[in-house]
Amino acid sequence: MESAIAEHLKCPRTRHRRVEDDYTPPYPVWSARAPASVKRVVMGYFGVQSRGAEMQGRACATLMKIVRDFALPDGPGHHDLAHYVDADGYDNMIAIAYWSEAAAHERWCATPEIDAWWRSDDRLSEGLGHFREIASPRVEHFETMFNTPNRFEGVGVVMGEVSGELQEHGYWGSMRDRIPLSQTDAMAPSGTRAVIAGTPAPGQRVRVAGHENIAMIRSGQEWAETTGQERTLYLEDMEPVLREGMDFLRDEGLGIGCYSNRYMHHLDAAGAPLQKSFGLSFWRSLADMERWAESHPTHVAIFGSFMRYVQALNFQLQLRVYHEVSVLKADEQSYEYINCHARSGLMNGLATA
Ligand code: HEM
């Protein structure tokens, strides 16, 4: 068993972990590791927003164009496709792309054809919304956790290496203990979100600035390989509760510090749904996220079910779960929306009208 914090990211502590050194977690989980040469990664959410069945074809074609552009020099090392319908009834398709080197992402964005496409006025007039939500955390500012050591998701795919079994998990507060920065920093938020260009409304190009220490989570589950009792338990017992929790964050999240929540389903390269989903949310602070996870009846129930399944199935789960959590400095965030409705992503709650 080892610490979630990689050796090269350890430093003298001014803050303590929530558990004693001899704590043993109830079941195994692993973390993705990157070589020490990796300093800063990029998690890029490239979205296409549309409304109504008649626009879906155009939206898909645009998503495919974004994916084709990933193959250009300095493109991402991994990407996923996902879809959800938001509270306003819009379809949102997102290509989520990961880079293990922030400089490569910058070069890719600056590629003339990609830059020109993004800046073109055509983006305002083709009946679609577009967004880019880019998080580029330094390695001290995020953590990952997987219940399988051999198949990673998300940023884990581009990090390339795997830890041993982790000590810091299975208790509330363990997510914080896995983030290297928690050794010395409470990661408290400061400042507020601000619209720095445009006005949150359709027909606008809007840029939103994040504040210090916005927390972001992608928490995913794959049930493709579950069978029998485990599958029934996931689909009939856990998933409806998860959906309720995700709907709560989407509809009432602002009141508890959740700026945006999307409960998304994976699509394959041809646009067909996979048996994989994830919640993606942005929060005012890690503390707000922690409070929801440990107190909201939906997540408490899911957590309890998971613990019972793990034991009942003698640690042989086919359900795969993982998450990646980042605490983002202001300079590690960039949010841009073109022709999107006012409650999209980080614009949610910022419209004055
Ligand atoms: C089927 C879906 C889910 C299951 C089975 C599940 C279960 C769990 C479990 C077992 C833990 C403790 C992990 C450990 O430390 O070993 C955990 C932690 C956590 N989960 Fe979930 N969860 C699910 C979905 C979600 C979603 C969608 C979100 C938010 C978008 C979320 C937010 C969190 C957070 C923030 C923690 C960390 C709490 C802390 O360490 O203080 N979970 N979850």
Image (spheres, helix red, strand yellow):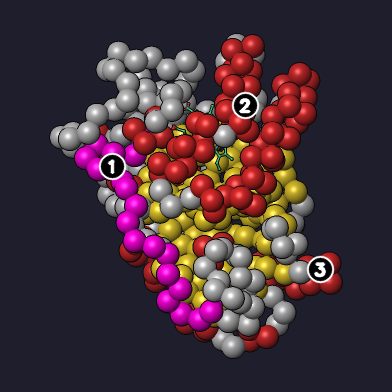
How far apart marks 3 and 2 lie (CA) works out to 35 Å
Q: Residue at x 51, y 35 (%)?
A: 293
Which residue, given by chain and number where applicable, does mark 3 sit on? 52
Sequence-wise, the earlier of marks 2 and 1 is: 1
Which residue, given by chain and number where applicable, does mark 2 sit on? 301
Magenta region, main secondary structure: loop
- What residue range appears in magenta? 178-200
Where residue 199 sits: x, y (%)? 53, 79
Sequence-wise, the earlier of marks 3 and 2 is: 3
SS class, disc 3: loop
Q: Are marks 3 and 2 in contact (CB under 8 Å)?
A: no
Marker disc for residue 186: 1
Decide whether residue 194 is among the magenta residues.
yes
Q: Are marks 1 and 3 in contact (CB under 8 Å)?
A: no
Q: Is residue 236 left or right of residue 99?
A: right
Residue 226, quarter of picture: top right
Q: Is residue 81 left or right of residue 54?
A: left
Q: Is residue 11 left or right of residue 74?
A: left
Decide whether residue 85 is among the magenta residues.
no
Labels 1, 3: front one: 1
Where residue 49 sits: x, y (%)? 67, 68
Q: Amino acid at mark 3?
A: Gly
SS class, disc 1: loop
Q: Residues within 10 Å of mark 2 (few under 14, many from 20)?
A: some
SS class, disc 2: helix
Q: Amino acid at mark 2?
A: Ala
Residue 163, quarter of picture: top left
Q: Is residue 100 visible?
A: no
Q: Residues within 10 Å of mark 3 (few under 14, many from 20)?
A: few
Dot 3 beta carbon under 8 Å from ligand 1: no
Q: Residues within 10 Å of mark 1 (few under 14, many from 20)?
A: few
